[in-house]
Image (spheres, helix red, strand yellow):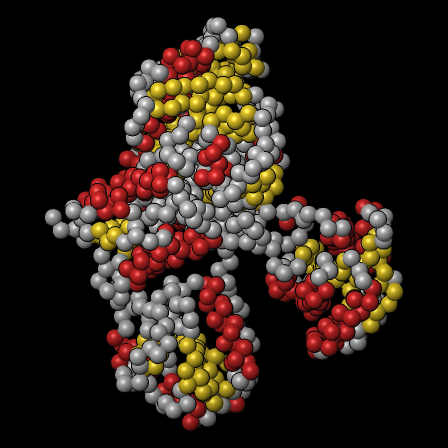
Amino acid sequence: MVYNFKIITNNELVFEKYGKEFEVDYKPGSFEELLLRVRDEVHNGAKLLTHPLTGSIKPNETPFKTVYVKKGKGATNIDYDSVVMIENAIITTRKFKIRFPVMPDNVRADFALIDLSLMESAISAVTQA
Amino acid sequence: MGKIKVVHYVNQFFAGIGGEEKADQVAFKQDGTMPIGAQLEKGMQAINPDVEFVGTIVCGDSYFNENLEKAKADILEMVKSYEPDLFIAGPAFNAGRYGVACGTITTEVQEQLGIPVLTGMYKENPGADMYKTKVYIVPTKDSAAGARDAIKKMAPLGVKLATGQEILASCIDNYMPNGIRKNFFETKRGSERAVEMMIKKLAGKEFVTEFPMPDFDRVDPNPAVKDMSKARIALVTSGGVVPKGNPDRIESSSASKYGEYSIAEFDDLTEATHETAHGGYDPVYCNQDSDRVLPVDVLREMEKAGRIGKLHEYFYTTTGNGTAVLNSVAFAKEFSQKLVAAGVDAVVLTST
Amino acid sequence: MNLKLELGYIKISDIQFSNESKVENGVLYVNPEDIINLVKEDENIASCAVDIARPGESIRITPVKDVIEPRVKVEGPGEIFPGVIGKVNRVGEGRTHVLKGAAVVTTGRIVGFQEGIIDMVGEGAKYTPFSQTLNLVLTMEPVDGLRPHEHEKALRFAGLKTAVFLGELGRNVEPDEIETFETLNVKEGIEKYPDLPRVAYVQMLQSQGLMHDTYVYGVDAKRTLSTIIMPTEIMDGAILSGNCVSSTDKNTTYHHLNNPVIHDLFKAHGKTLNFAGMIITNENVYLADKERSSDWASKLCQYLGVDGAIVSQEGFGNPDTDLIMNAKKIETVGVKTVIITDEYAGRDGRSQSLADADPLANAVVTGGNANMVIHLPKLDKVIGHINFVDTIAGGFDGSLHEDGTIECEVQIITGATNELGFSKLSAR
């Protein structure tokens, strides 16, 4: 099965779970860096399929973020709604100060799990779309 | 505690000197109060008897606005000479130039002298929008008939400011919302307020939202240029037109910068010389001929025909696509200074 | 064929431990062994400690998972928490007894960054409604190796079962006060109040995944389409919380049972407006779901032919998008909206409050700025795990001082900026 979406994530757990089945663009990095990577994709025509601020955990708490996008056809086909949404998410992220420069491993693992769970809730919708 | 010293600023009218014909009154200071200041003083004394209006500064509205730098400097010195704990200007009600003067001078005093300041005016006074995020402005009625009401609101806030008390939310301490959100406890819970707001909204009555949506900034156009044949016209675009190769690498979307480029040597933009950096629309036609977005060719013709005075040497450009409003405002603030300094009379602003 | 529910309030003035669990003369007596046995029926729970926290006592409860009001169905079909604890039969009619003033509070470590503080006294107490309730607090530890999904579920069920057990003690107690809620069908409503504006309530339910879920008659709300529900069904526990994140603006099961929008709409019903119906809609992570759910919410408003709709929110961030979509679409079909939200305007109050905005959302009620910094005193007793304070929402590195005081954002407090409008905190 070939899907027309891809998963952009900085969460290794998501990569482990979905990496074989779907196209997963996994790269470790900060929450904000992840949003910027998503924005790059949006600038190349990708369309957001999930909200960039999934979950009620604040962007300065969880280091993990995963976003599903519909693959783009290049910069000539930009989805404006996606541009606005990712920009708003970046603005919101920047107004919070990172709270845990050093995070205990167990907490990190829990945040990774929550991020994965949030994205699991959308995977069937995405694969059937 | 000793005296709480207040200096008050009024225009020629409230100083009893005269109306518009005396608007060129040079700034001067006078110990004690003028009539409206006396009422304000009384209102504040009722709350704190230590309040004393030690001096009043009078300045004509035209004089202030036409001699801005000198007026500001002179008035600052006058304020300083009293070493006050609070500086109050107005209330200006709906008097436009007076309101702007009140906003300007209170902002100046606050920034330069570090003294708490307060003013008051009608919400549609142009000074309100210009200064409400900088200084505390009490909303008043639109004419001096509302003086009593204005004083009732200004006096308690003035006492709080002068004595360094914490300023609470705008709806409690009666100042115009200044963009700083402050928490407080309402007397009714949120759901009840929602039901009441709903009933008002349905009945077509006035209701006040507790959170105004961000301003989708609308700008009124300037008055028409009187004589286009003498006007210097500049081109500004959010269509991303740049010299071929995009030398400053302006982003295709969500731009973090703008470009300033000379068109002195161009009568016509071509595929060889210009292109667009903009994403989000089909760039083919702009890349073929950037005049389609930045109409240099047409303006040159008009320049030659004498229909416009001159096409300005530089154009300013960025991509509008997804660019944050804050960034756009910052760009425009910067380059509009340059345009004004270069004597540009009007700008043709193109998008995509 | 109108629906009528009577709520019989049994006013509880104290909770005490006792050999026998019962309600007598307004006192709720609890035998902790009864509770522990009940909770440990679930083999996933290794231990359970039971405490009492009363208003004014020097007690801090953290991390709070859920708060639940004890209720029992004494007349009419169905049972409390239908489809979860009770049978799936429909509820919302007959009579329900409420132990008014009492609450079950569950705490426990599900993940390492757990959240929610209830202070029974001091500065923090001002911000949470649960400083005013007599709380029976359960601190539970799971068996080793229990995964977060099962752990969350175990705690959720333990709280609900305990609340049902306590509610049952009020079955044969004569209530101090009875309040009646009557829902007319659409036709009856229009005939009875031809001149009053008709208003609907649109409740948005958090529905995003682990620790972000809400259940309707036992169904995970993320798998639902926007639908119509009777407001009295909610008073019998048709909606309950599995949401453990963003304590300040999550709706606990207690909030759902006592949904203030429903109560205040009923109060105005027949006087200034006609409470014409209630719609529930979800807050999913998938953007197409958001579009679909808000389309359906607005379509139902249009179909009911209401004049206005109050929309309430739950949670931070992407629900702002659902909220604005709902407001925009409902306004676009000609129905006037008032929305209830809260703000994240930064500690200095200067940042953009919401993650989304639209000029059509011109009537907003706010529960305040969740980023506001407050200072909590050291309290004598902590129930739960205080070392979580540094890591829970609203706390920040170094927020737990050596002297036991806490410097934190108000969002650390359970229910502080509630988006049902349950509290009086606001901002301008």
Report the side of C275 relative to C322 (left or right): right
Q: Residue B260's quadrant in the figure?
A: bottom left
Q: Residue A35's quadrant in the figure?
A: bottom left
Percent x, y of residue B33: 86, 61
Relative vertical location of residue A110 with respect to residue C187 in this rendering, above or below:
below
Name which residue lies at 51% across and 58% down. Answer: B215
Report the side of C61 relative to B79 (left or right): left
Percent x, y of residue A70: 24, 54
In the foreground, C361 or C46: C46
Name which residue lies at 33% across and 53% down. Answer: A29
Report the side of C307 relative to A47 (left or right): right
Which residue in the rendered view is the most extreme toward the right? B31
In the foreground, C122 or C264: C122
Name which residue lies at 27% across and 83% down. Answer: B271
Which residue in the rendered view is the most extreme toward the left? A1
> How many numbered badges does the structure rendering display?
0
In the foreground, B144 or B127: B127
From where the camera sits, is residue C90 visible?
no
In the foreground, C159 or C304: C159
Which quadrant is home to the N terminus of chain C?
A: top left
Percent x, y of residue B80: 79, 66
